Amino acid sequence: MIQIATSLEFIHIRRVIHRDIKTQNLFLTGNNTVKLGDFGISKVLESTTQVAMTVVGTPYYMAPEACQSAPYTTKSDIWALGCICYELCTLQQPFRADNLLGLVFKIVQETPAPLPSTYSLELR
């Protein structure tokens, strides 16, 4: 997770929002280096105060503000990273639904189940 957080910090300093952080866009090399890939829908912001408004990306990892069609920043990538961390710990996405509308409602209104107590307090 630290390698991905470092990758996000690298692109965010350069005012790039990835906008599709998900497990399928993380790649493990032969020497156990994690790489962030698929910048196909990323966006370069003009300034650090600019926000994006287009709804793109994989719904399971979408930040609440993007679900509400509100402006979002690089923090939406951090939200997605949190979703990935949750998924790695529980082997399921934090928000699940049978349809897109139900998924959006859960992301905006609900809190995912807590991580199992087998994990450290810091991680939980």
Image (tube, rainbow, N blue to C red):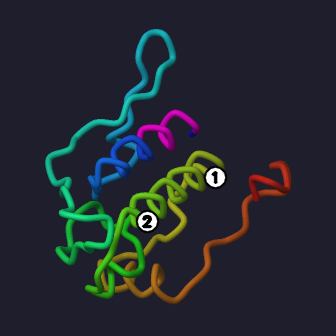
Taking the magenta stretch, the answer to whether it contains residue 99 is no
In the rendered image, which residue does mark 1 sit on? 90
In this view, 32 is above or below 101:
above
Q: Position of residue 64 (x, y in %)?
A: 42, 79
Q: Circle 1: is it few (<14), some (14-19), or many (20+) Cα within 10 Å?
A: some
Q: Which secondary structure dominates the residues rendered in magenta?
A: helix
Residue 73 marker:
none
Q: Position of residue 123 (x, y in %)?
A: 75, 53
Rendered residue at 20%/66% (across/down): 56
Kind of residue sitting beneath label 2 = Lys
Q: Is residue 95 left or right of residue 14?
A: right
Give the magenta-colored segment's residue range: 2-7
In the rendered image, which residue does mark 2 sit on? 75
Closest to the camera, between mark 1 and mark 2, is: 2
Q: Is residue 69 left or right of residue 96?
A: left
Q: Along the polypeptide, which appears first: circle 1 or circle 2?
A: 2
In this view, 59 is above or below 89:
below
Front in this rendered view, residue 65 or 85 = 65
Whole-angstrom CA distance, mark 1 to mark 2, is 23 Å
Q: Position of residue 67 (x, y in %)?
A: 33, 81
Q: Is residue 96 left or right of residue 19?
A: right
Secondary element type, mark 2: helix
Secondary element type, mark 1: helix
In this view, 31 is above or below 110:
above
Kind of residue sitting beneath label 1 = Thr
Residue found farthest to the top: 31
